[in-house]
Image (tube, helix red, strand yellow):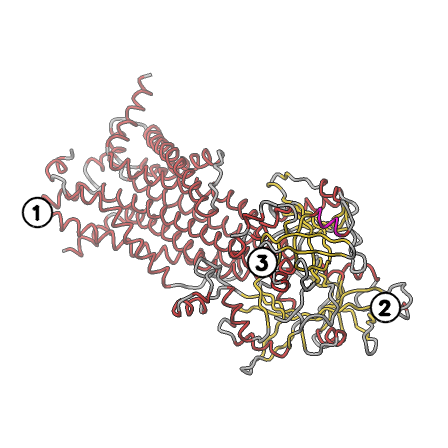
């Protein structure tokens, strides 16, 4: 097959003829591929991360007893929490059960009693998540992570009223029952938590005498708004005795904001990709057009237009492949690093992005070389005479 | 001669110049669009985040601890301290008054309610015990500087949906929560009777409210009605404020008391949530202004992330545009080796040749950059309209950046081949080697 051998030999020579030119084309194609791969990879990852980020707002779904109204604050069996599916395709659900009690609190042994809401929480360590954002509390969150026996976390306003300090002993009384605890940290959220004392769920249950009962289950469900709705419908079937409702303030706002952000991202990414492709294509065409002389010579020595064209398209495809393979690899590494810069966690590389980016680059390279078709009506004689 | 050479270069090989120009224009269009959108997006998104509702909560400093479970305060109405409603106009006099997008005071009182069909509240057929939340809806506040401002709970709690319509401010009307409506059989248009200390009130139900929390089980009415039942005329227990803020950075989190005067000034004049809270505290005596951290910090975190994400995309597009444009102009210089050789053979110095080519490229950059800018602005408008319904604001900064970038990129792109060109020996080139 001397014919094919010749074909490849010409291509090899075409590529190697001018290293400067080769470098320039590969740079343009590689840059395009890198941007494509990085943006495609980052976009998918960023949308997922954002839904996780939204959980900073706290629980977005609550499960309350069905008959919960002003007159009868009912309770749920603790086992209801076990019917919540923890692992969803979008991530895992964080769950916390709580029992609320109004109790009289005083600083041991003989302080002025104050009425306050006691939140029995399970797991108790969830408190540290609530505190995450508040800077003053951030320092304390380490301690809240280790729920000691009889420990309690006190809202800043309660602490103010009681004049409680770190390690102060508190006595919580509800009728004849009472519990004691010592203050391990304070919480300041600007919400109702500031007026509450958080203790272990068991202690709260002992305090009211309702073992294995809870008044609310709070869920932080990751994922897009539609995924949350599906989960709510599912939970309503699984726990018939309870009322499952979204925290509308956050679910609704989130849905709106999430849609906006994901649209901005998609639009910008598509825009950048299309225009990057056009840029690379224009650069590629520019480079291809200078092949006039070569085409003229080949035609003069008997090359059919189709063959000549195939030769140049093969060259373009080869360039696209090389540029794509190199560029997309750089792009994926880049997106991992960018993910780390923005979200603190490296973006997970998606393998599908790689072939897509390479394929796109090849297409762009070939499309860029396509104006060579016009070279078909070049007259060899004109080229040799040096006419332009 | 110089100008003639440049002009000839453009008119003789229009297609080549067109292609380089097109690459430039497209690249700069990407850059412009991305830059305009990301410059604008922060403010737009901050406004979007107000759909999460209030981020500041005001209560009286002397207030006792609220016994709030699931959004319902179990304290008796006469417990705790209240604040005067008449002060609220002052909120629109603070430094960042235009950043306050809405506020609404609230008074809660437990009431017995029944409908006409059940004659008296002693027959419990449809009688119900509920919380009556008194607040503002479309309330006109008079600001001390003589202007007025309309605000209400629909601004601070935008997720509250009313089926029917909101009550009119100051009328004997109310909306009822959807669970309450289901429980007591109240419909839009019924007259709801409320027991008050003095005489029984009859409220016209104008809508069914669904909010997803305790308000679904409550009656929401004009604040004057709740104040009368609670026996606190002209006073409120809590105030919700929704304010546009700048995400808190390291500086914003510092304790203002420890700042140097110049830094304090800067802190005070930045719309951090904490500085807005301080300014509100200064105009409302006896008030305790708390930042609802859950809303404020979540918002701050997401805004910061999205912003940096968009800056990255912008940067990426600038980079891609720069590389493609650079490659394009490099190619256009490389192919002119013969021309360069001829010029040098005729006695042109390397400097002259470089200057000539650079001038051509700069001219191209200017034209291509300007074209790309207009195209990019159009694109940015399109994207802005599609996403936010508002086109991004025009910015001279973007124009400057784009033209500058176009010039730098073309020059850099041609610099390396130009340097090599200036070292060419004319003879071999002219021989075609």
Q: Residue at x 9, y 43 (%)?
A: B345
Secondary structure under the numbered disc 3 in the rendered image: loop
- Image quarter hosting the C terminus of chain A: top left
Name above or below for residue B238 compared with residue B335.
below
* Magenta stretch, residue numbers: A202-207
Q: Residue at x 33, y 39 (%)?
A: A374
**Residue that lies at the very extreme toward the front in this rendered image:** A109
Helix or strand or loop: what does disc 1 sit on? Answer: loop
Assess whether mark 3 and mark 1 are in contact (beta carbons under 8 angstroms). Answer: no
Quadrant in the rendering for residue B144: bottom right
- In the rendered image, residues at marks 1 and 3 fall on the same chain: no
Residue B182 place in picture, x, y as percent: 81, 59
Q: CA distance from mark 3 to mark 2?
A: 51 Å
Which secondary structure is most common in the magenta stretch?
helix
Q: Is residue B202 visible?
A: yes
Q: Image quarter for residue B266?
A: bottom left
Q: Residue furthest left?
A: B347
B14, above or below B122, in the image: above
Secondary structure found at label 2: strand
Residue A9 percent coordinates (x, y): 28, 24
Residue B54 relative to residue A270: left or right: right
Circle 1 is placed at which residue position? B347
Q: Within 10 Å of the Cα at label 3, are there few (<14), some (14-19), or many (20+) other Cα atoms?
A: some
Q: Is residue A175 magenta?
A: no
């Amino acid at each position: 097959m001397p014919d094919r051998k010749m074909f490849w030999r010409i291509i090899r020579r075409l590529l190697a003829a001018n290293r400067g030119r080769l470098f320039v084309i590969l740079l343009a194609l590689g840059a395009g591929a890198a941007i494509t791969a990085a943006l495609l990879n980052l976009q998918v990852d960023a949308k997922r991360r954002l839904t996780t980020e939204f959980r900073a707002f706290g629980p977005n779904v609550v499960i309350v007893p069905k008959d919960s109204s002003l007159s009868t604050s009912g309770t749920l069996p603790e086992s209801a929490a076990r019917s919540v599916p923890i692992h969803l395709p979008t991530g895992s659900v964080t769950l916390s059960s709580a029992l609320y009690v109004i109790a009289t609190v005083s600083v041991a042994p003989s302080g002025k009693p104050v009425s306050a809401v006691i939140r029995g929480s399970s797991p108790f360590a969830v408190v540290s998540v609530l505190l995450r954002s508040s800077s003053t509390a951030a320092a304390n969150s380490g301690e809240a992570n280790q729920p000691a026996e009889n420990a309690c976390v006190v809202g800043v306003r309660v602490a103010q009223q009681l004049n409680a300090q770190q390690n102060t002993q508190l006595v919580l009384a509800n009728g004849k029952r009472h519990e004691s605890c010592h203050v391990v940290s304070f919480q300041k959220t600007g919400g109702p938590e500031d007026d509450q004392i958080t203790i272990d769920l068991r202690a709260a249950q002992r305090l009211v005498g309702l073992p294995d009962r809870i008044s609310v289950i709070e869920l932080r469900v990751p994922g897009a708004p539609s995924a949350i709705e599906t989960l709510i419908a599912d939970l309503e079937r699984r726990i018939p005795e309870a009322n499952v409702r979204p925290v509308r303030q956050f679910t609704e706002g989130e849905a709106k904001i999430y849609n906006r952000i994901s649209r901005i991202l998609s639009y910008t990414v598509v825009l950048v990709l299309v225009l990057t492709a056009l840029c690379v294509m224009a650069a590629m065409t520019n480079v291809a057009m200078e092949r006039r002389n070569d085409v003229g010579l080949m035609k003069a020595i008997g090359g059919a237009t189709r063959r000549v064209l195939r030769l140049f398209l093969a060259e373009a495809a080869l360039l696209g492949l090389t540029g794509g393979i190199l560029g997309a690899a750089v792009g994926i590494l880049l997106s991992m690093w960018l993910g780390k810069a923005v979200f603190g966690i490296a973006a997970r590389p998606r393998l599908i992005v790689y072939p897509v980016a390479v394929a796109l680059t090849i297409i762009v390279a070939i499309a860029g070389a396509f104006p060579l078709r016009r070279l078909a009506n070049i007259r060899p004689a004109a080229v040799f005479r040096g006419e332009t | 001669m110089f100008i003639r050479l440049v002009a000839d270069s453009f008119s003789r090989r229009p297609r080549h110049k067109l292609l380089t120009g097109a690459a430039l224009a497209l690249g700069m269009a990407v850059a412009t669009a991305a830059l305009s959108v990301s410059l604008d997006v922060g403010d737009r998104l901050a406004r979007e985040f107000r759909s999460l509702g209030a981020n500041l909560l005001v209560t009286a400093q002397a207030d006792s601890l609220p016994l709030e479970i699931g959004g319902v305060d179990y304290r008796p109405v006469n417990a705790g301290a209240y604040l005067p409603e008449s002060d609220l106009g002052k909120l629109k006099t603070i430094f960042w008054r235009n950043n306050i997008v809405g506020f609404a005071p609230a008074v809660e009182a437990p009431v017995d309610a029944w409908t006409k069909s059940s004659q008296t509240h002693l027959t419990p057929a449809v009688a119900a015990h509920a919380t009556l939340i008194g607040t503002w809806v479309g309330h006109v506040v008079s600001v001390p500087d003589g202007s007025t401002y309309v605000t209400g709970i629909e601004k601070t709690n935008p997720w509250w949906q009313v089926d029917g319509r909101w009550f009119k401010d100051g009328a004997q009307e109310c909306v009822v929560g959807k669970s309450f409506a289901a429980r007591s059989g109240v419909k839009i248009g019924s007259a709801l009777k409320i027991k008050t200390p003095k005489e029984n009130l009859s409220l016209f139900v104008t809508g069914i409210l669904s909010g997803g929390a305790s308000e679904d089980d409550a009656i929401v009415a004009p604040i004057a009605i709740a104040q009368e039942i609670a026996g606190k005329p002209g006073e409120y227990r809590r105030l919700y404020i929704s304010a546009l803020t700048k995400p808190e950075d390291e500086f914003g989190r510092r304790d203002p008391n420890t700042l140097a005067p110049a830094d304090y000034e800067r802190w005070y004049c930045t719309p951090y949530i904490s500085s807005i809270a301080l300014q509100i505290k200064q105009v409302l005596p006896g008030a305790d202004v708390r930042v609802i951290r859950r809303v404020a910090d979540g918002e701050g975190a997401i805004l910061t992330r999205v912003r940096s994400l968009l800056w990255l995309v912008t940067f990426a597009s600038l980079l891609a545009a720069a590389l493609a444009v650079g490659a394009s102009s490099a190619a256009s210089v490389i192919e002119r080796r013969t021309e360069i050789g001829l010029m040098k053979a005729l006695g042109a110095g390397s400097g002259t040749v470089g200057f000539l080519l650079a001038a051509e490229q700069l001219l191209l950059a200017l034209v291509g950059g300007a074209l790309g800018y207009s195209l990019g602005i159009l694109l940015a408008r399109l994207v802005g309209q599609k996403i936010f319904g508002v086109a991004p604001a025009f910015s001279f900064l973007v124009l400057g950046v784009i033209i500058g970038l176009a010039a730098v990129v073309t020059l850099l792109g041609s610099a390396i081949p130009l340097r090599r060109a200036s070292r060419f020996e004319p003879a071999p080139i002219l021989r075609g080697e």
